C-alpha cells in the first residue's frame, strides 16, 4: 500500500510540473497569436486603403514628390516650414 501511495504521489508531482510547462507555452502562444492578429488587422486595413486612388495619390505626392500635371508644388523652407 505504501508503494502505491508513493507511486501516485510521484505521478501527481511529475504531471503537475508538465501541466505548468504546458500552461506557460500556451500563454506564450496566446500572446504571439494576439500580436499576429493585430498585425494582420493592420495589413488588411492598409490593403483596403491602397485600393483608394486618392490615398495612392497622397502617397505619391508625399513620398515620391509626384504631382498632377496641373498642380504647382509649393515647398516651404526655413524655420517653421514643413518637414
Image (cartoon, rainbow, N blue to C red):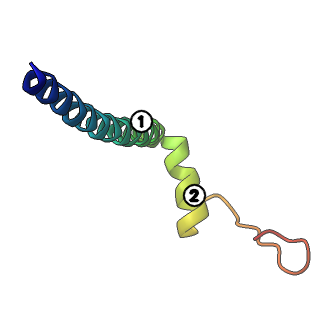
- Find out whether the residues at labels 2 and 1 contact each other: C-beta distance under 8 Å: no
Q: Nearer the viewer, residue 7 or 68?
A: 7
Q: Between label 2 and label 1, give the one nearer the viewer.
A: 1
Secondary structure beneath label 2: loop
Residue 18, horizontal then vertical, whole percent: 22, 37
> Within the image, what quadrant is residue 71 found in?
bottom right
Residue 24, horizontal then vertical, whole percent: 35, 40
Residue 83, horizontal then vertical, whole percent: 75, 71
The dot on residue 34 is 1
Q: Is residue 20 left or right of residue 49?
A: left
Disc nearer the start of the sequence (2/1): 1
Residue at numbered disc 2: 68
Q: Is residue 20 left or right of residue 70?
A: left
Which quadrant is the N terminus positioned in? Answer: top left
Farthest top residue in view: 1
Q: Residues within 10 Å of mark 2 (few under 14, many from 20)?
A: few
What residue lies at 58% left-to-right and 69% top-to-bottom? 65
Q: Residues within 10 Å of mark 1 (few under 14, many from 20)?
A: few
> Within the image, what quadrant is residue 3 found in?
top left
| Residue 17 visible within the image | yes
Q: Nearer the viewer, residue 36 or 55?
A: 36
Q: CA distance from mark 2 to mark 1?
A: 42 Å
Secondary structure beneath label 1: helix
| Residue 66 visible within the image | no
The dot on residue 59 is none
Amino acid at each position: 500500500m505504501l508503494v502505491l501511495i508513493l507511486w501516485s504521489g510521484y505521478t501527481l508531482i511529475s504531471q503537475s510540473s508538465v501541466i505548468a510547462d504546458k500552461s506557460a507555452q500556451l500563454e506564450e502562444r496566446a500572446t504571439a497569436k494576439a500580436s499576429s492578429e493585430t498585425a494582420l488587422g493592420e495589413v488588411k486595413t492598409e490593403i483596403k486603403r491602397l485600393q483608394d486612388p486618392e490615398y495612392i495619390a497622397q502617397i505619391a505626392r508625399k513620398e515620391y514628390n509626384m504631382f498632377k500635371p496641373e498642380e504647382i508644388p509649393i515647398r516651404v523652407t526655413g524655420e517653421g516650414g514643413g518637414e
